[in-house]
Image: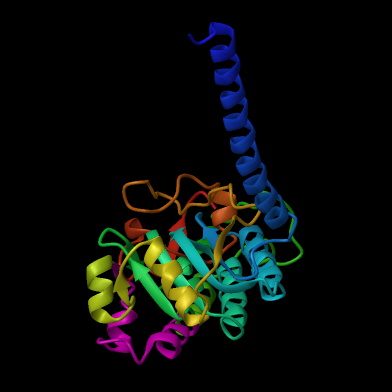
Amino acid sequence: MTNPIDKHAKTLATSWTFIIVVAAIVGGVGGVALQSGSDSGPENSVAVVNIESAITGGTGDAVAKELRSIRGNDSIDAVVLRVSSPGGAVSGSEVQYRAVKRLAQEKPVVTSVRGPAASGGYYTIAPTDKIYVTPSSLVGSVGVISSVSENNGVPSRWKSAPDKGTTGPADKARARAATFRQSFLDVVMNERGDDLTVDRETIGRAQIYAGNKAVEIGLADEIGGLDAAITDAADRASVQNYGVVYRSPGGLGGLLSIIGGNSDTGAANAVSASEFCTNEYLAYAPQAGPDLEVIQNASC
């Protein structure tokens, strides 16, 4: 007859043996993870950089700084720009475009558009190797919005010259807008010209297109999401075993908008009239009208 005490001791010993084995396995796994975590990161990786707000000078600088850091990081083999931006200030858009252009000369850069990539947002991604969009993405709006100050002849403060503190007369503002527009068009035609199925004049109408249409006319390359963009970027870098790191450049929290914009049209919500009246914008603002380059704003 089996002694109950011996049976209990045997069961207990078996249980402890099981626990020790499991502990050894877990310890081994933990050791591998710890060893992996002790490195600065995976030997090969694809960086996903979020650009998900309207563009200001500050956001442009933040994006440029992040992309400059990635250029110098040998563990990052390719980059995906995850974009949802209606555009914004000319200065910030130009800074972002040049930073992306420089990065694309050294590493594969692919774009995944998850919302709008309009105006300055599209300007930013024009140099990338491939642009993925969703059917609901909003792409294009290759144009400029500028503003001029109205002056009723009653000065609100002393100025050393009539144009000090203003954007100048309407004809000068229009001339500036025309210069920015031509520059923007030049960039799009140079970067995407071989893929476009429409002419320069059509692109210059500043229309915005849904994802499927953007692919059809060559402003984008393919319907696909973030995973497709990551895989494509890795293939272009000829890496198979890689990690994915996510970067969100600092200072992208504040939203900039165009006067009269609303969330239904894709423009951001509310910016002060004083700020609007001293800037030009590469921004999607349907309420401005398809051909309107200069907005007269009585509150300026």
User: How does the figure colour the protein chain or chains?
Assistant: rainbow
- Residue at 54% of width from left, 53% of height from top? 300
* Rendering coords of residue 223 (x, y %): 28, 69
Looking at the image, can residue 142 be seen?
A: no
Q: Residue furthest front?
A: 1
Query: Which stretch is magenta?
Result: 183-209
Number of labelled discs?
0
Task: Decide which of 33, 164 is in the foreground and name it.
Answer: 33
Left or right, residue 83 beside residue 264:
right
Q: Is residue 172 left or right of residue 232?
A: right
Whether the magenta-drawn stretch holds residue 204 is answered as yes
Compare residues 147 and 7 and report the one nearer the observer.
7
214 in relation to 190, above or below: above
Residue 40 visible? The answer is yes
Measuring from the top left, give residue 255's x and y in whole percent: 53, 49
Nearest to the observer: residue 8 or residue 157: 8
Residue visible at 70% across and 66% down in the picture:
65
In which image quadrant can residue 73 be found?
bottom right
300 drawn magenta: no
Residue at point 37%, 46% (across, down): 263
- Image coordinates for residue 204, horizontal then vertical, percent: 34, 80
Q: In the shown orientation, is residue 24 left or right of residue 53?
A: right
On the picture, is 285 further left or further right than 3?
left
Measured as percent of width and height from the top left, residue 260 is found at: 40, 49
Q: Nearer the viewer, residue 292 or 13?
A: 13
